[in-house]
Image (cartoon, rainbow, N blue to C red):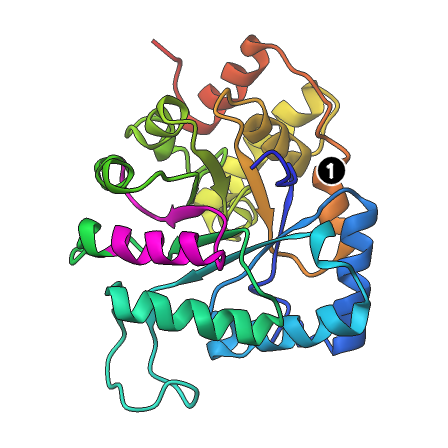
Amino acid sequence: MSDFSKVIAGTIRWGSWGAKLSSTKMADLMASCIELGVTTFDLADIYGNYTTEREFGDALIFSGISRDKIQLIGKSGIIKPCAEKPGFTISHYNTSKRYILESVDQSLENLNTDYLDMYMIHRGSPMLNFGEIAEAFQILYESGKVKSFGVSDFNHTQIQAMNKHFPVKGAQMEVSMLRNQEMYNGVLDVCMEHQVIPMSWAPIAGDVIFTKTKTGKRRYSKLEALAEKYEWTVTEMAIIFLLHHPAGIRPIVSAPKINKIKEFTDLLDVKISNEQWFDILRTVRGEEVY
């Protein structure tokens, strides 16, 4: 787990759900990430309506990057009706033992690799059977197909329950300066208690920070004034706030542009005081901390 980079490159927007990068451009982006020290790549079978994994795998071969120089995170469990997933009429979750084993095999084929560094259940389904999931995890671990396991968008009780059946090493969540509920609802506390690496898939809550609504504009004005006080930009302030948390949150940067990823790596060594951190929090909340 120590091999996972402190900033993670998210691929959700690399394919048809975003930039539609060619194999050449995807390979170039991978290489540029590695130059910045970003060696961990976050994937999921559903990205690009089940096409991005395969495109990433083709680009990985094209890039010539050695597999042992990078870490791949895979996820599955969401069923989304589309051309690549015929036979279904509604979106739902499948976390059965059979589906997990089959989806990991498909991901390995798509990615042109023999193993995943981490595999995650993609959503905290209300139908989770922790014992059955653990059986699948054990098979995948013993076969060498997956090195470690995690969860995505699980609440704190679900993380605890899963951890009782099989060690959870990573947890993805929506947490940021503006979406900070995970700092209060027990999720980050559980991560620290069990040495689970928390990963934020929306590290700056860009859609909230940069919204054009009246409320959003008023909030941005206050954030901008505070950022100027400390000689930051609002984006820098959001990144610094997240990185300062003692849980060791690792941001997943989904922007398919190396300059956006570099914004995060440039700030990894920036230190702030607890007073500055709480100054940001009180501005976001619009009230003093009591």
Q: In terms of depth relative to the viewer, which is nearer, 20 or 116?
A: 116
Provide residue 178's location: percent of width, then percent of height: 46, 36
Q: Residue at x 37, y 48 (%)?
A: 151
Where are the magenta residues, as a range?
133-156
Residue 236 lies in the magenta-colored region:
no
- In this view, which residue lies farthest toward the front? 142
Rendered-image quadrant of the C terminus: top left
Q: In terms of depth relative to the viewer, which is nearer, 56 or 184?
A: 56
Q: Is residue 94 visible?
A: no
Report which quarter residue 97 is drawn in. bottom left
Looking at the picture, does residue 160 appear above or below residue 143? above
Judged from the image, the secondary structure of the residue bearing numbered disc 1 is helix
Provide residue 2's location: percent of width, then percent of height: 60, 33
Residue that label 1 marks: 265
Q: Is residue 140 left or right of residue 25?
A: left
Report which quarter residue 10 is drawn in. bottom right
Looking at the picture, does residue 252 appear above or below residue 264? below
Looking at the picture, does residue 89 appear above or below residue 277? below
Q: Is residue 109 left or right of residue 151?
A: right
Q: Is residue 15 left or right of residue 174?
A: right
Provide residue 40's location: percent of width, then percent of height: 64, 49
Rendered-image quadrant of the N terminus: top right
Q: Residue at x 70, y 29 (%)?
A: 268
Q: Is residue 164 left or right of residue 222?
A: left
Report which quarter residue 125 is drawn in. bottom left
Provide residue 163's location: percent of width, then percent of height: 29, 37
Q: Is residue 156 visible?
A: yes
Q: Amino acid at mark 1?
A: Thr
